Image: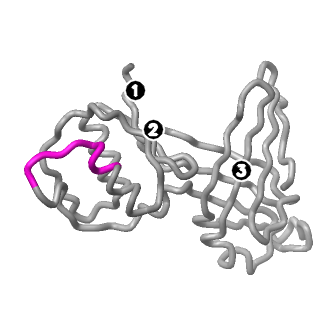
C-alpha cells in the first residue's frame, strides 16, 4: 500500500489516502479523485505517471482498494475494479518512469460494476406489486452482497426491465419510491434521503 497524498488545502481535515492495485506500481500514482453519489456507481479516478504500454489493456478488471483515513472517524474504503485506462503522451516531453506514456487516467468502478450488464425482466415475476425491499433482497442474493433497506418501503407497480442493467432498474425503483441507493464495499444501502 502506498501513501498517495495528504491535504494541502487550508481548512481541510487531516487525512491520508492509501492505494492498493494488484500487480501495479502504486508509487507512480499522483492523484486520486473519489466520487460517491446516491443512485450512481462509486467511481475512483487515478492519475498515474509513466505507465507501461502493456498496462493499458492488462489491468482492465484488476481489483483496486483505496483507503481514506481520517483521525476523527473510521474513514472510508473503496473496493472496486479498473474499468478503463486513458493514456496520454507528447513525444517532445520524453519519458516518464521509463515509458513514453507520460500520464494515464485510470477509471475504477465500485462493487456495483458487476451489476452493469443489460437484462430483460419483469419485476415481480409473480404477483402484481412489490417493494424495493423485495428487489434489493433478490439482487443481494444474486450478487453475493449484504443489504440494508427500510422494511416499510412503499408498494410500487410492476416494472419492466427492458435493456437496463440491474443497477439501473434498482436506482430507478428507489427514486420512484422516494428512496436513494448506493453500494459501498459489499453492501447495498437503501435509505430515505428526506429523513
Q: Earlier in the sequence, mark 2 or mark 3?
A: 2
Disc 1 to disc 2, C-alpha distance: 9 Å
Report if the CB atoms under discs 1 and 2 are less than 8 Å apart.
Answer: yes
Disc 1 to disc 3, C-alpha distance: 26 Å
**Element under disc 3:** strand
Report if the CB atoms under discs 2 and 3 are less than 8 Å apart.
Answer: no
- Image mark for residue 66: 3
**Element under disc 1:** loop
- In the image, is residue 89 above or below residue 108? below
Q: Quadrant of the C terminus?
A: top left
Is 133 included in the stretch rendered in magenta? yes
Q: Say which of 5 and 169 sits in front.
A: 169
Q: Earlier in the sequence, mark 1 or mark 3?
A: 3
Residue at 22% from the left image edge and 59% from the top image edge: 161
Scheme by which the image is coloured: one colour
User: What is the x, y in percent for residue 77?
Assistant: 67, 45
Within 10 angstroms of label 3, few (less than 14), some, or many (20 or more) residues?
many
The answer to which image quadrant residue 151 occupies is top left
Disc 2 to disc 3, C-alpha distance: 19 Å
Which residue has dot 1 on it?
A: 193
Q: Say which of 168 and 29 sits in front.
A: 168
- In the image, is residue 80 above or below residue 59? above
Magenta extent: 127-136
Which residue has dot 2 on it?
A: 38
User: What is the x, y in percent for residue 190?
Assistant: 40, 38
Residue at 83% from the left image edge and 60% from the top image edge: 26
Amino acid at each position: 500500500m502506498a501513501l498517495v497524498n495528504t491535504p494541502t488545502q487550508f481548512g481541510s481535515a487531516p487525512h491520508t489516502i492509501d492505494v492498493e492495485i494488484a500487480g501495479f506500481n502504486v508509487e507512480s500514482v499522483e492523484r486520486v479523485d473519489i466520487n460517491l453519489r446516491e443512485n450512481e456507481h462509486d467511481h475512483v479516478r487515478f492519475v498515474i505517471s509513466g505507465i507501461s504500454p502493456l498496462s493499458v489493456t492488462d489491468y482492465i478488471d484488476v481489483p483496486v482498494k483505496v483507503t481514506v483515513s481520517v483521525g476523527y472517524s473510521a474513514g472510508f474504503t473503496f473496493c472496486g475494479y479498473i474499468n478503463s485506462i486513458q493514456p496520454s503522451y507528447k513525444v517532445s516531453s520524453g519519458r516518464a518512469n521509463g515509458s513514453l506514456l507520460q500520464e494515464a487516467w485510470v477509471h475504477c468502478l465500485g462493487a456495483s460494476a458487476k451489476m452493469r450488464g443489460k437484462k430483460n425482466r419483469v419485476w415481480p415475476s409473480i404477483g402484481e406489486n412489490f417493494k424495493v425491499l423485495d428487489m434489493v433482497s433478490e439482487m443481494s442474493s444474486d450478487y453475493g452482497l449484504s443489504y440494508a433497506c427500510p422494511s416499510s418501503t412503499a408498494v410500487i407497480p410492476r416494472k419492466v426491465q427492458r435493456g437496463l442493467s440491474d443497477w439501473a432498474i434498482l436506482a430507478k425503483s428507489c427514486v420512484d419510491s422516494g428512496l436513494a441507493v448506493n453500494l459501498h464495499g459489499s453492501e447495498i444501502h437503501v435509505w430515505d434521503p428526506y429523513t
